[in-house]
Amino acid sequence: MYCCGRSMSFPAAAVDTGSDVKLPSLMLFPHNFEGTQEHCVAALARVERTDFLSPMCIGEVAHVSAEITYTSKHSVEVQVNVLSENILTGAKRVTNRATLWYVPLSLKNVDKVLEVPPIQYAWKELEEDGKKRYEEQKLERLVTKQRNGDIIFPVFNPEPYTVGYSQSSLIHLVGPSDCTLHGFVHGGVTMKLMDEVAGIVAARHCKTNIVTASVDAINFHEKIKKGCVITISGRMTFTSNKSMEIEVFVDADPFVDEPKERYRAVSAFFTYVSLSKEGKPVPVPQLVVETEDEKRRFEDGKGRYLQTKAKRQVQMQPLTQQ
Amino acid sequence: MYCCGRSMSFPAAAVDTGSDVKLPSLMLFPHNFEGTQEHCVAALARVERTDFLSPMCIGEVAHVSAEITYTSKHSVEVQVNVLSENILTGAKRVTNRATLWYVPLSLKNVDKVLEVPPIQYAWKELEEDGKKRYEEQKLERLVTKQRNGDIIFPVFNPEPYTVGYSQSSLIHLVGPSDCTLHGFVHGGVTMKLMDEVAGIVAARHCKTNIVTASVDAINFHEKIKKGCVITISGRMTFTSNKSMEIEVFVDADPFVDEPKERYRAVSAFFTYVSLSKEGKPVPVPQLVVETEDEKRRFEDGKGRYLQTKAKRQVQMQPLTQQ
Amino acid sequence: MYCCGRSMSFPAAAVDTGSDVKLPSLMLFPHNFEGTQEHCVAALARVERTDFLSPMCIGEVAHVSAEITYTSKHSVEVQVNVLSENILTGAKRVTNRATLWYVPLSLKNVDKVLEVPPIQYAWKELEEDGKKRYEEQKLERLVTKQRNGDIIFPVFNPEPYTVGYSQSSLIHLVGPSDCTLHGFVHGGVTMKLMDEVAGIVAARHCKTNIVTASVDAINFHEKIKKGCVITISGRMTFTSNKSMEIEVFVDADPFVDEPKERYRAVSAFFTYVSLSKEGKPVPVPQLVVETEDEKRRFEDGKGRYLQTKAKRQVQMQPLTQQ
């Protein structure tokens, strides 16, 4: 598994700070260099819905392998598999599978998107399936962008289990160590902060230990530059019997360099489950929705919940056979 | 508490590396931009005496709120409150209160101090009180600067409980991750190193677990640039029955960029208490002072100790009512 | 011990990330500045064989002292001693002794090696001994460079205890926080990653807890720049009754800046021992060598093992008397 061209191993302690996400971008360099004349940097544009199958423990070695599965004119789809290996017992298990979309930007002018040299497909069907995924995500990105005007306002003296009761936000000044070599925030840094806010929202709501079960597609609408102040806000949108859905926004204020307006950079839905002291999922208190907007968002969340549940039942068979 | 314009929340694990101090500087940007034409960076000039009321535990969420309480022509006073929230029980408590002074520097020329646009005061008394605090700290900064020629020399084969026995120093090369976007050391990084040295001095003296009780006003006399080598030295100056006062100096050698002379960048007094295994304060061995300088510093420390004790008794009533 | 010109103290937690190695380079600055006209940066060229005498524990204070022991025309030999102090008991012990070679590079043109101003020796013999060490390491660097063409290929379905069974590799993108102020990877960062890979190889082979016993001379053949992707690969070369020797390579791909070829930047041999649950060394499974190359490397490793064993018996007497 280890030591071949497109896969790599990591001690688990190194994986925490978004290394999982940093890695695929490494692999794009050789690909891009083959065909383009201009030097480029791969900007993370979208992470498809990711289910966390199993936690990774300290002392384990993570094996990350990735391959390019589709290229459009201006974007690259990368499939990533994360395996966890207990080096003492030798046991390996899949902890994570993810699909990421990258866009190559010119190193001379990071606002210029470069063309992607096409890959060769083993079967014509692979290209057709990829094209379908490409069109679907393009549409969904558009829809998300339109929904993005929403702002989370502070609520004073909220009642328990309402949306206002658990909503939370963090502020973070983007420093040099958060950034890539080209001065943009690592996708993994943003995702870690989003998960932290979502986790605080979930814990405030149910007052128990909680764990991330899945992250819905994360769309990176705009790059975040070094020196920005980012506000990461989260609010609960939906509760099923044993899960909570939390919507998280990342807004960027480009203070230092230019007096540009605040903009919505990233948004996503996180799903958490509540755990008993024995680590088993337990029922969560139901979310109390009050305003029309909160009711609409609850219904939207229910739609996503049911859709995912249906998809999972379809996928269960092939997944367990792998 | 969370999610309003001038406050922010943080998981406790993120707070350690000086984030407490980084935050207020964030809040100054909007203020400064409103009134000044030139882009600026807020340089930390002074942290007023800070008492550590209660430790923050892992898993708790820190709420940091801050407001500008006074502006002079060239400086800004910021009051910061740190609350710790146990998100499982919902309990909150004040862990820290601090007052910081910032000076706005031009981004085009960081040696140029900009003018601060004045704030509006709710009552005239607030401005008068602020002015009094401003004058007091200005005077004290001057006094401290004069005292700053002192150097800590190595002592060979010192006797237990003498000043030389516990004095300690660290050396640190200021790297990129210690610095702000403009290449100056974060105030929080310096303060963390100072606390480390003071902690080593205290532990060497009393051979028990020790904890920071308070930090006297910290004056940042001069900026420290990326590439400097800083020497942080600490020596015990005074012991009361259950506390130890340690003086800490930070000296900077600007090796890499220019062959400038070593200069005293920061100095402060830290107060530590010794703890029993049950975490209760216990008596500390008395400091053995030998030279005239040591005796003078002991008396000075006693003065500060008695003054603080008197102040605390005055403040106790309003503080417990808050 | 602390607080004199050429020594420094550090809490043990700060020591992990290669601080041990960063420190001596600090001390070279004053030396170089005295004699050279041009500003320079000290590049780590080689670390001599290092035995880990004793682990350093959390809460202990590390005392690092160093002195220049020899200068050739273009290089500086530095001897470093690391003492660990338990500040509660006051007990100190040597944890580490190392000899490092640095080369001064011009800050204006980092490809230009500057001349080193000669030091004064207390006795003529010190200079002669130093010259002998200089010639020896120069020869060994040359030999290592020639051996460096080797590549570690992936092996599919390897048998337990073969070389292919435990061989491992990591990939790392060199980010800003891995680098010195001049954009080159810290020697300590590289050494930490090499130790991680060697540790994974050792643990895969013997399925027990393992600990680094010694590191053979590490030769830094070429600088690694910010933005490189480095591949760190390790394979077992030799097993004695209670120790394992692992060869580690660091290869750099200078993707981002220039489409230069991959090059071998660093290589070294690590020796690990296998520990029982009580922390005592236990016998290790013998390495199964299959190919001619593997057999040759096993014999070479045996040679190094016997040579070191012989040297240690000679050195044992003076060492225990110190």
Image: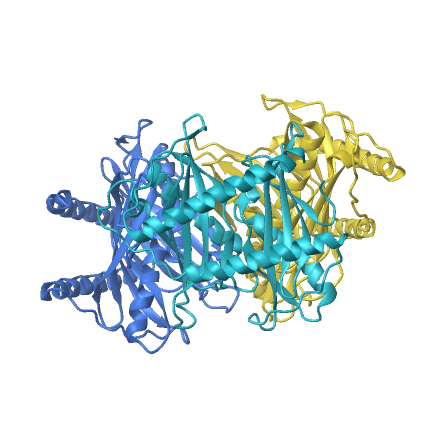
Chain colours: A blue, B yellow, C cyan
Q: Is residue A78 visible?
A: yes
Q: Is residue A261 above or below residue B204?
A: below
Residue placed most toward the observer, B295 or B231? B231
In which quadrant of the rendered image does the C terminus of chain C lie? top right
Relative to A289, B174 lies left or right: right
Q: Write down the quadrant of residue C273 in the picture.
A: top left
Q: Write down the quadrant of residue B205 in the picture.
A: top right
In which quadrant of the rendered image does the N terminus of chain C lie? top right
Residue positioned most to the bottom: A37
Q: Residue at x 30, y 34 (%)?
A: A274
Q: How many marks?
A: 0
Q: Is residue B200 above or below residue A247?
A: above
Relative to A209, B42 lies left or right: right
Residue placed most toward the observer, C255 or A237? C255
Relative to C155, B44 lies left or right: right
Q: Is residue A167 visible?
A: no
Q: Position of residue C89 (x, y in %)?
A: 65, 27
Q: Position of residue C181 (x, y in %)?
A: 57, 62
Residue placed most toward the observer, C310 or B179? C310
Q: Write down the quadrant of residue B183 in the picture.
A: bottom right
Q: Position of residue A83 (x, y in %)?
A: 27, 46
Q: Is residue C14 above or below residue C111?
A: above
Q: Position of residue C189 (x, y in %)?
A: 49, 53
Residue placed most toward the observer, B190 or A121? A121
Residue positioned most to the right: B292
